[in-house]
């Protein structure tokens, strides 16, 4: 069985939004100590992570209360590498998103913006028309291959996040799709259950689509 890990490594020099993650060694292996123990200081939006509805909706569902039916199940990777900056509803339809309830956007980010250690001046994100189309189609999970789902021109009012969060759609950001082909898979994504919080790191795996027949 081929299992695809979508998570990006977490380290102090990584691509980040806000402060860089840092760590300290609390214990190190030595003649008098048998183990290593580290302590990390990271943001909830570090690395491959999930945004819960409460990120933009007061009183919305928090990351520890997300339904497993949203983050685990059949999913579709869409080839959107031709999109320059903003994924529209028409782009989603052309890429074959109809009928999917969990979608992941493979864009040029996976081999460009996502590979950098600093914020890129441009990237590909989901536009408001695309977000509304997903909601109208009953999509419950959407993933992008950059540190924000939002398209570059909308990072003031954040309309895509507002649309998706108000509809209860789970957002996965920083998903590495560089080695993933477009098509149907079985998604397993489980965010760290930070109680009452708006986001959390979320290891994410894609398994063969036929996995759905044995689970």
Image: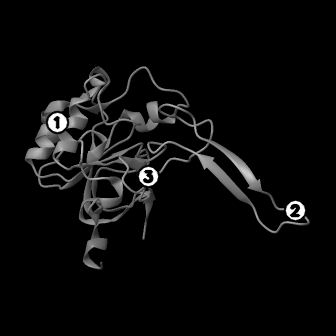
- Residue farthest along the bottom direction in this orientation: 214
Say which quarter of the image contains residue 120. top left
Q: Compare marks 2 and 3 and give the one earlier in the sequence.
A: 3
Compute the Cα span from label 2 to label 1.
Answer: 55 Å
Q: Nearer the viewer, mark 2 or mark 3?
A: 2
User: Disc 2 designates what residue?
Assistant: 30
- Residue 54: percent from left, percent from top: 28, 45
Label 2 crowd (10 A; few <14 / some 14-19 / many >=20): few
Give the residue at x 63% y 39%.
12
* Residue 168 falls left or right of residue 182: left
Q: Residue at x 11, y 40 (%)?
A: 133
23 or 16, which is in the foreground?
23
Q: Are marks 2 and 1 in contact (CB under 8 Å)?
A: no
Q: Residue at x 31, y 36 (%)?
A: 149
Instruction: Report which quarter residue 82 is drawn in.
Output: top left
The x, y position of residue 41, in whole percent, is 59, 44
Q: Position of residue 3 (x, y in %)?
A: 43, 64
Secondary structure of the residue carrying numbered label 3: loop
Q: Which residue is mark 3?
A: 6
Instruction: Identify the secondary structure beneath mark 1.
Output: helix
Q: Is residue 132 visible?
A: yes
User: Which residue position is annotated with label 1?
Assistant: 130
Residue 161, compared with residue 76, is above or below; it is above
Front residue of this view, candidates 172 and 92 = 172
Q: Which residue shows up at 74% across the image and 54% down it? A: 26
For label 1, count other residues whose C-alpha is less than 10 Å away and answer few (under 14), some (14-19) or many (20+).
many
Task: Find the residue positioned furthest to the right.
Answer: 31
- Quote the CA–CA distance across marks 1 and 3: 22 Å
Is 205 left, or right, of 85 in this rendering? right
Residue 205 at what x, y percent from top left? 41, 60
Task: Report how far apart the C-alphas of labels 2 and 3 lie in the structure.
Answer: 35 Å
């Amino acid at each position: 069985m081929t299992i695809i890990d979508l998570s990006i490594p977490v380290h102090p020099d990584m691509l980040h939004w806000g402060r860089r993650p840092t760590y300290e060694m609390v214990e190190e292996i030595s003649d008098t100590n048998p183990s290593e123990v580290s302590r990390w200081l990271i943001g909830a939006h570090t690395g491959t992570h999930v945004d819960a509805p409460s990120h933009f909706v007061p009183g919305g569902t928090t990351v520890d209360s997300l339904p497993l039916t949203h983050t685990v199940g059949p999913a579709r990777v869409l080839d959107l590498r031709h999109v320059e900056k903003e994924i529209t509803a028409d782009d989603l339809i052309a890429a074959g998103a109809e009928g999917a309830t969990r979608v992941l956007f493979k864009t040029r980010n996976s081999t460009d913006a996502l590979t950098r250690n600093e914020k890129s001046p441009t990237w590909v994100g989901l536009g408001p028309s695309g977000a509304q189309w997903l909601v109208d189609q009953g999509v419950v999970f959407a993933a992008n291959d950059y540190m924000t789902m939002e398209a570059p021109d909308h990072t003031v009012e954040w309309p895509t996040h507002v649309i998706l969060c108000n509809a209860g759609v789970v957002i996965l950001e920083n998903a590495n799709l560089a080695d993933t082909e477009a098509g149907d898979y079985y998604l397993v994504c489980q965010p760290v259950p930070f109680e009452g919080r708006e986001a959390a790191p979320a290891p994410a795996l894609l398994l063969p689509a036929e996995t759905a027949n044995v689970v």
